[in-house]
Amino acid sequence: EPFLHRFLSDILTVAKGKGFQVNLVTNGTLLDERNIQHLVDSRLDTLRVSLSAGTPLDYESNYPGTDPAFFTRVIEGLKLLTRIKTQQESKFPAVVLHHPINRTNFRTIDAMVDLAHATGVHALSFSPWLTFRGKFASRSLTGNDEQILRSSLSQISKRLNSLSIRHNVQELIQRYDIGYAV
């Protein structure tokens, strides 16, 4: 989690000052006003927020033992980021909401589209759940699950297009077509 690094703001300032393109990946739970303001001020290129849940119930299923209030914290942080960027007329950072698809969340992808729209993110990306050498394999999609997911992806793509939210649905379909490392 990059926001736990005590020198993150200095690192961003130096990297952007040297002309680097800088992208951060976070779980979004530490998106408070101070951190957001620094992201905007530093002109961070891309902030990618990884979230395996589109609803509070999905959050409890995907993050067992974690305080369910963190889900609301992530969503409110994204909304605050959008408001601050709008107030300051800044396009930085571009915000990507990332959704790893697993057995407990594949039926609620519509909720992720709702979240992407409600929070004002630029893009919604998806990836298959990776098992990391067999660990967490129980969360991988079965063949039947994958077929159910595939049948909904065309509508998801159309909906995201109508909302002008960038996405990688076609890439996701291709990843399922050719397989992916498990």
Image: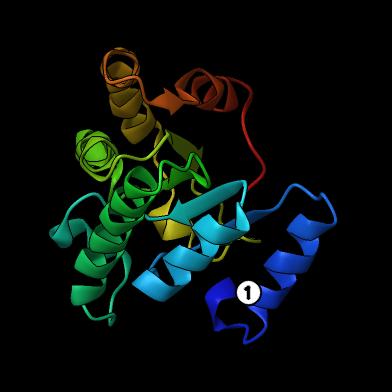
> Which residue occupies 27% across, 13% down?
162
Figure disc tally: 1
* Residue 120: percent from left, percent from top: 30, 39
Q: Residue at x 29, y 58 (%)?
A: 80
Q: Quadrant of residue 135?
A: bottom right
Of 52 and 24, the residue lying toward us: 24
Query: Which residue of the protein is positioned furthest toward the bottom in this rendering?
Result: 6
Kind of residue sitting beneath label 1: Ser
Query: At x 28% / y 82%, what residue is drawn?
Result: 65
Q: Please state if 37 lies on the left or on the right of 17 as rendered.
A: left
Q: Quadrant of the N terminus?
A: bottom right
The residue that appears at 25% across and 58% down in the rendered structure is: 75
Left/right placement of residue 19 relative to residue 140 reads right
Circle 1 residue: 9
Image x and y of residue 168, in percent: 50, 26
What's the colour scheme? rainbow
> Does the rendering let one see residue 82?
yes
- Residue 151 position within the rendered picture, expressed as x and y whole percent measured from the top left: 29, 17
Q: From the viewer's perspective, is residue 173 above or below residue 32?
A: above
Q: Is residue 18 above or below residue 110?
A: below
Q: Nearer the viewer, residue 142 or 173?
A: 173
> In the figure, residue 143 lies in which quadrant?
top left
Furthest toward the front, the residue is: 88
